[in-house]
Amino acid sequence: MSHFSAIAQVPGDPILGLLDAYRADPNPAKLDLGVGVYKDASGLTPIPRAVKLAEQRLLETEQTKTYIGGHGAAEFGERLLQLVLGTDSALLRDGLAGATQTPGGTGALRLAGEFIARNLPGRSIWLSDPTWPIHETLFAACGLRVEHYPYVGADNRLHVDAMLEALQRIPAGDVVLLHACCHNPTGFDLGTADWQRVLDVVKARELLPLIDFAYQGFGDSLEQDAWAVRLFANELPELLVTSSCSKNFGLYRERTGALIVRADSAGRLAAVRSQLALLARGLWSTPPAHGAAVVAEILGDAELKALWSAEVEGMRQRVASLRSGLVEALRPHGLAERFAHIAEQRGMFSYTGLSAEQVARLRTEFSVYLVSSGRASVAGMSEARLDYLAGAIARVCQA
Ligand code: LMR
C-alpha cells in the first residue's frame, strides 16, 4: 500500500516557482524580473560591504553556537526597534514596544497570523486587493478569515477613496494589513495625507493594524519609509509590525526579521510577548542567529551603520533610475505614456499593467520572467538590458 498515493500535486509557488523556471532556461538572453531580489549591473545579488565586514568581525569574536532565546538576540531586537520606531522613540524609552526575532518577514507574518488566530478569536484579516499572494495563503493557513479592501483597480491606478470607504465598513476589532511602503505587488504607495485618513478610520472603527514593513530604505529613504509606521505607533495604543532585513541588508537566505508589538502598558506587552514565545516555540523553536547577529553588529557600530545606510541608498537610487530608464527605453516604441506609471511607483516592484497572456508571451518568446499578475521586479533589471526588455514589451503589446 502507498501512504502517499492520494496526495495531489499542487502548482509551485507563484513567485519562487519562477526562480526555478528561470534557472532552468538555457536562453543566454533571459531576464529574471520575478522574485523580489536586488541585482547589480552584472546581474549579481551582492552582499553589502557592511555585511561582509560585520561577518568578518563575527568570525573572530563569536564564541558559541548555543541557542538564542525565544525572542531572539536582545541586541538585535533593541537595535531593530530603533531603526523602525526611531532612535528617540518615547515608546522605546517607556518600554511599550518589543521585537520578537523571526525567520524573515514571512516568519513574522506567520507568527502574527497564528497570534491573531489563537489569541484574538473571531477577528478577520483584511488585505489590500491586490496584495502579495503569500499573504492570502499564509493567513488562510493560520485559520483566519481573509477579506479584502480595494487598493489598485483594473485601470492600474491607486483608489484611495474606495479603500477608505471599504475600511469604514470593516467590523470593529478586525485586523487590517497595511504595507508601510513599496507596496507589493503594485509599487503604488499611500501619500502622507492618505495615511492620516487611514489612521482616522482605524481609530474610529477600532481596528488593529498589522503593518508589513519589508522594504525599509527602498522607497524614499530609511527614515522616510518609516514615517507611517511611526505615525501609527505613536497615535495608536496597540499595533503589530512585521519587519524584514532580507532586502535592505541583502540577507535574503539568512532569514532575518521580527514581529514588533506596540502595547499600551508594559504588562500587556509582556503578556502578548509570552504568547508569541509560546507560538514561536511550536513553529521554529528559536530563530536562526547569524543574520540577526550581522544586523546587530551593523546597527551597533556608527561606522558600519553609515556604510550600510549609504549602500541601501545606492540600491534605492539605482532602482529608481532603472524605472525611468525603462520608460525612456519604451519611448521609441511609442509606449512611454502608457507605461509612465513605472517611473512613479516606489520600491522593488511595478504593476506593469501587462496581462497574463502578455506575461506568458514574454516568457516563452523572450525568456523574460514576470509574475503572471503583471508584476515586474524592477530591482532585477539592468541598464544594459533595458532596450531588450522594452523591445520585448513592445512586441507583446502589439495587437
Ligand atoms: C517577493 O514578493 O518576490 C518577495 O517578497 C520574495 C518572496 O518571498 O516572495
Image (spheres, grey):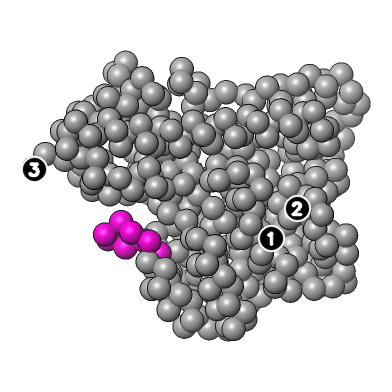
Q: Does the magenta stretch mainly form a helix, a strand or a loop?
A: loop
Circle 1 sits in a helix, a strand or a loop, which is it?
A: helix
Question: Does residue 295 appear left or right of residue 110 in this picture?
Answer: right
Stretch of the chain drawn in magenta: 151-158
| In this rendering, the label closer to the viewer, 3 or 2 | 2
Kindly identify which numbered label has been placed on residue 230. Answer: 1
- The correct choice, above or below, for 22 with respect to 60 in the image is below
Tell me the kind of residue under disc 1: Arg
Quadrant in the picture for residue 314: top right
What kind of element bears circle 3? Answer: loop
Which residue is located at x 33 percent, y 33 percent?
326
Please, what is the three-letter code of the amino acid marked with disc 2?
Answer: Gly
Residue depicted at 33% across the width and 59% down the height: 157
Q: Which mark is residue 344?
A: none
Left or right for 159, reference 120: left
Nearer to the camera, 191 or 174: 191
Residue with the mark numbered 2: 86
On-image quarter of the C terminus = top left
- Spatial CA span between label 1 and label 2: 8 Å
Q: Decide: marks 3, 1 in contact (CB < 8 A)?
A: no
Residue 227's image quarter? bottom right
The answer to whether marks 1 and 2 mark residues whose Cβ atoms lie closer than 8 Å is yes
Q: Where, quadrant-wise, is the N terminus in this rendering? A: top left
